[in-house]
Image: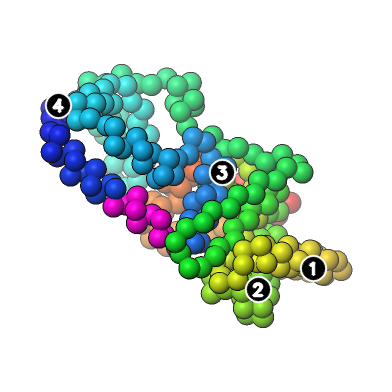
Amino acid sequence: NELSLSAEELEGIKDELRKEISDHKVTSAIDRAVELSSYLSISPSFLPEDYAGELESIAADEVNAFAKAIFQRVYVEGIVYGNVSKGDFKEFTEKFMANLKAQSLTNDEVAAIRLHEDIVNPGQKFVSSISDQDNNNAFVSSIYTGPRTYQNVAKNIVLGSLIETEYFSSLRTQQQLGYLVQAGALSTRSAVQLAFYIQTDHAADEVASRSSEFLESFLTSLDGTLDAKFEDSRAGLVEELSRPPISMDSRFSQLAGLLFERNADWSYNQSLVSALRS
């Protein structure tokens, strides 16, 4: 069925979106900083203020035409886990495509429209600052530690596990910089990195300076003790990654993550365990 949106109905939708855009300006500082971090590293990315102006110029006939064309060519990606056979799922997807009366996008077309991660080159730095209506400040920092390979992910996870507790203890408990202090390893589709998050009422540049001082001191303190800490951390991570999901729901979540975040690499955890052990 074709969408038939009236001008009055569109105006009601616009009112709701205007409120969402307005509310976005009072989002917590840490949420805005995390959002901006993603905005800077993923393309194409948009913030609500980027499309706020476009909202006013959209007409009902444009929305109706867009809705009519949106399913003409599609790419369906999904996962089924449970008491469903491969044949049943294949039959379902064929009926689904037939009902849409849609043509499938090619693999090259799908690759072209996927989000692209902009990798920071060695020595390159991106710094951005925003000012909003939240009374708090936030600091978000990502340090890229290499391309995403099993070996790099394994090393990065170990290093992140060593940093996270010490980072919280130093900047939250001892220095009391903020009530939200986190650090740890992060792996995206293309790279591995260490990520640091602080929400605070201190000045953001002061927090950034103290975070850098901690990292420098922490890395220096590892001299002579890294081997023992590394072995303890590695053993714990191997045990955690080797543990099977305890419920159907957790198993499904794991498989969905492997499909959408790890390009359907079903042996990802096993390969990661092998990398950790080596």
Q: Which residues are magenta?
A: 19-28
Q: Which residue is mark 2?
A: 171
- Residue at position x 19%, y 30% from top? 60
**Closest to the observer, 19 or 187:** 19
Residue 6 point in image, percent of width and height = 12, 33
Q: Amino acid at mark 3?
A: Leu
Q: Which residue is mark 3?
A: 40
Q: CA distance from mark 2 to mark 3?
A: 26 Å
Q: CA distance from mark 4 to mark 2?
A: 56 Å
Q: Compare marks 2 and 1 and give the one earlier in the sequence.
A: 2
Q: Which residue is mark 4?
A: 2
Left or right for 22, reference 95:
right
Q: Compare marks 4 and 2 and give the one earlier in the sequence.
A: 4
- Residue at position x 51%, y 61% from top? 30
Assess whether residue 27 is covered by the magenta stretch: yes
Q: CA distance from mark 1 to mark 3?
A: 28 Å
> Residue 175 appears in which quarter of the rendering?
bottom right
Q: CA distance from mark 2 to mark 1?
A: 13 Å
Q: Which residue is mark 1?
A: 217
- Residue at position x 49%, y 51% from top? 35
Q: Compare marks 1 and 3 and give the one earlier in the sequence.
A: 3
- Residue at position x 51%, y 68% from top? 136
Q: Secondary structure at mark 4?
A: loop
